[in-house]
Amino acid sequence: MSVFSIGSPFIYLVGVQGDSLTVLQAPEFVSFQKGDWPVSGEKIPDLVALTMGFSIQEDLSWPGLQAGPLFQRPRANVLVVVRGVDSLALPQSVASYPLENPVPFTLDSVAETVHSLFAEDTPVVLQLAPSEERLYMLGKANAVFEDLPVTLQQIRARLSQDGSVLASLPLNSLSRNAEADLLFLSEVQVLHDITALLQRHRHLAKDHSPDLYSLELSGLEELSRLYGQDSPQYRDATAILASVLQKFGEDVYALYGNSAVVEVVTVKTFEVPLTRKSRSILESKQISNPGSPYNLAYKYNFHYAVVFNIVLWLMIALALAVIAVSYNLWNMDPGYDSIIYRMTNQKIRMD
């Protein structure tokens, strides 16, 4: 099983562009409804979990995704986050939805669920952010993607080797020598290498554990900051990325036997929640919850009601049992109710 998410019996392709979420590919049993229902950025991990057939703590009251068959789940889920662009001209998609509250998010919770449920099958979990040189691999991903270039230095060296995307892409105004241009092209190279490695290890798409892939691309954000959104470099890069992502989704979908979901999230800028510095704990009185500067209660746990009822009724049952036993012992007649005294009395009479 793979989480990159690559490697599960079914794969979903979903795309989020700018302030929108676009589903590129999805199997028939994963029903995305067309409409303008907004989805919050912080709910995307829950949406990914539901498409893979996993349960979530809070119900997602969003009509864009309908319940599917109980015994069918996609073999893989691929989520690509594109930063620095409002929207991408993706030629084909299943559905597209507005994106609200685009806060930073991760698929760590989904990856943990995949690993815990399919630990014996060693699923593939791959999370990669080339611009930050951040990589997380789990299960079979360690063996399959061990040669995948992840640092900027490795990826730039890969661009000069055989099979580089530079030989097939229409660079136009993009330069092979500019740092920002190379960052964007290196991210395109990573997408190409991932599909190439999957084609080389097709057995990953045939196992019974789902795969998860998570990619974060920020090359467009750097181009926008350096050249501006009206520059020819930015326009050419946007057109190249839209074409590459469309082909990437189609290739992954085909590799998993039309049983995959691929998601692309395009966000111009992430909204960082505002924070407020609190006074030192030495300047204030001790509070019940050290993690909250406002003396708030701990976050509610959804298992609280169950645990509370178990403890409550168990204590009541034990208390009633103690009362009943104590009452019977207090009112017991040793001569009639106790077999010890009864036999002793009979022995005395016989003597």
Image: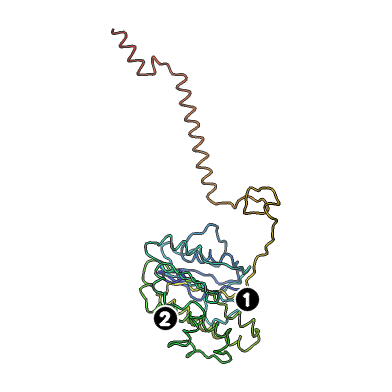
Q: Which type of secondary structure does the marked residue at label 1 adopt? A: loop
Precedes in sequence: disc 1 or disc 2? 2
- Name the residue that disc number 1 marks: 268
**Residue farthest to the front, as pictured:** 282
Q: Quadrant of the rendered structure where residue 200 is?
A: bottom left
Up the image or down, 279 lies above or below 312; here it is below
Residue 105 vs residue 138, the one in the foreground: 138
Visible in this render: residue 95? no
Up the image or down, 153 lies above or below 344; here it is below
- Name the residue that disc number 2 marks: 196
- In this figure, which colouring scheme has been used for the structure? rainbow
**Quadrant in which the N terminus is drawn:** bottom left
Residue 339 vs residue 51, the one in the foreground: 339
- Picture residue at 47% right of the left edge, 30% below the top: 321
**Residue type, label 2:** Ala
Residue 150 vs residue 204, the one in the foreground: 150
Tell me if 163 is positioned left or right of 238 in this view: left
Question: Crowding near pointer 1: few (<14 within 10 Å), some, many (20+)?
Answer: many
Up the image or down, 288 lies above or below 9; here it is above
Q: Quadrant of the rendered structure where residue 139 is?
A: bottom left
Q: Percent from the top left, x then y, of residue 348?
A: 32, 9
Q: Which type of secondary structure does the marked residue at label 2 adopt? A: helix
